[in-house]
Image (tube, coloured by chain):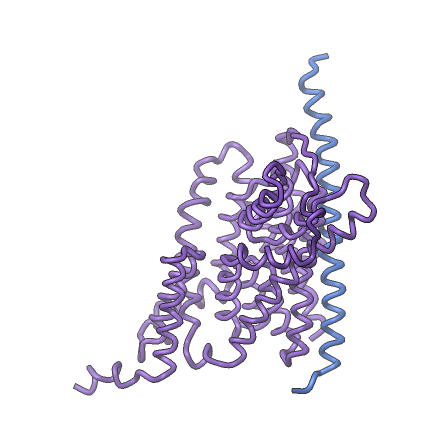
Chain colours: A purple, B blue
Amino acid sequence: MEELLKGILGINGGTIFMFIIAGILIYLAIAKEYEPTLLLPIGFGAILANIPFSNALGSDGVLSILYNAGIKTELFPVLIFIAVGAMIDFGPLLKNPFMLFFGAAAQFGIFATMLVAILLGFDLPEAATIGIIGAADGPTSIVVAQKLAAGLIAPITVAAYSYMALVPIIQPPVVKLLTTKNERLIRMEYTEVKVPKSVKLLFPIVVTILAGLIAPSSVALVGFLMFGNLIRECGVLERLSKSAQNELANLVTILLGITIGSTMVAEEFLKPRTLLIIGLGLVAFIFDTAGGVIFAKILNLFLKNKINPMIGAAGISAFPMSARVIQQMATKEDPSNFIIAQSISANVAGQLGSIVAGGMILALVPTFM
Amino acid sequence: MSIDWEVFSKGINVALLGLAGVFTVLILFYIVTKLLFHFGNKMDKDNSNPD
């Protein structure tokens, strides 16, 4: 009898609170469609992990096995990168490589938030891990967190995916605050450029070598992303490309989500610092957006053909959400102003920029520890 | 709450070097893309011109 009741008797306030949090994540995934592919598995994983005496955790628990095999080794996020690479069309960026600069500027939030986190009492690796929420890139956040502050992996991942879903709410007020109406009305010329096949093929190879030589710690991130992209672009591996985009992405996403959810154990998750981390994640997204917009405004001081500074905000990695938000804002100001092509270019650049920023953090932080 | 200024100064170094590193790598990507385009277009022209 005691054996049958031990689960019920083991319930405490923390368990109930975690069930509520898991419920909120599942609700957001289903009812609001906020990143459902991840928030739902994360929410359910949190339930599995918080049932008292859950045999899903522990040395023989399936979730612990998945964690050790897929997260500790970075296998899941890296496999996701193959899938993401196979999904990304670098064409818009290759047509307009100038937009790469916005992909760099919009990483400002990562580093600014890291400094804020240090001021709030976090140590350097923890602060850098919190800053990486601003990469707006789940797999990069997981890899960096796993390497620098594994204890923070749950709140970091939940914050990263939640804020990515909230880009349409976070970005517009920041962009509006930093731009004038006249700036938001700026039109940008767009000329269609044909991208030679050789460029599409060589780009992933050259970028991998270049990034790897400068920041070897980014090889796993950049390399697997570009490997996926090469499968997509080579034209002779359509079956593999489709598998990477569908079966691989779906399978790994299911396992990644539920495994991350399993790290949301009440004793670890219910700490004041979790709230602080989630708050700092929002700061990171705000700083990212501001960094991109302000960079565009600075460039406009020197450019003859002005850039619509809203494009700078699309330099974050949340693709294609951010580009869409910027186009919606432009259309709101002037229904005949189309800056979607440039926004998408900046958004793709952000995907590259976030991974490079992750590599930089992984390379630099250990040298200053 | 006390601020550890030593950690903060390390953070400043990481932030400056990190941001500079991201810009450097993406500037290199920009140059590489331009070069690839230059040679890619040249190759396309050569291939389309049988002479």
Q: Relative to A128, does residue A293 appear above or below in the rendering?
A: above
Rendered residue at 63%/78% (across/down): A122
Whole-percent x, y for residue B5 in the image = 74, 81
Residue drawn at x 37%, y 67% as measured from the top left: A45
Quarter of the rendering containing residue B10: bottom right
Residue A229 occupies which quadrant of the picture? top right
Q: Quadrant of the C terminus of chain A?
A: bottom right
Give me the residue at 35% from left, 79% from top: A15
Q: Position of residue A273 (x, y in %)?
A: 54, 79
Q: In the rendered view, would you say A324 is above or below A146?
A: above
Say if A28 sits above or below A124 in the image.
Answer: above
Q: Where does residue A332 sit, x and y in percent of width and height?
A: 58, 45
A49 to the left or right of A306: left
**In this view of the protein, which residue sits in the foreground, A197 or A261?**
A261
Q: Residue furthest left?
A: A1
In the picture, measured across the screen, residue A198 lies left or right of residue A153, that is right
Q: Position of residue A154 (x, y in %)?
A: 48, 70
Asked which quadrant contains residue A361, the reply is bottom right
Q: Nearer the viewer, residue A90 or B51?
A: A90
Residue A204 shows in the view: no
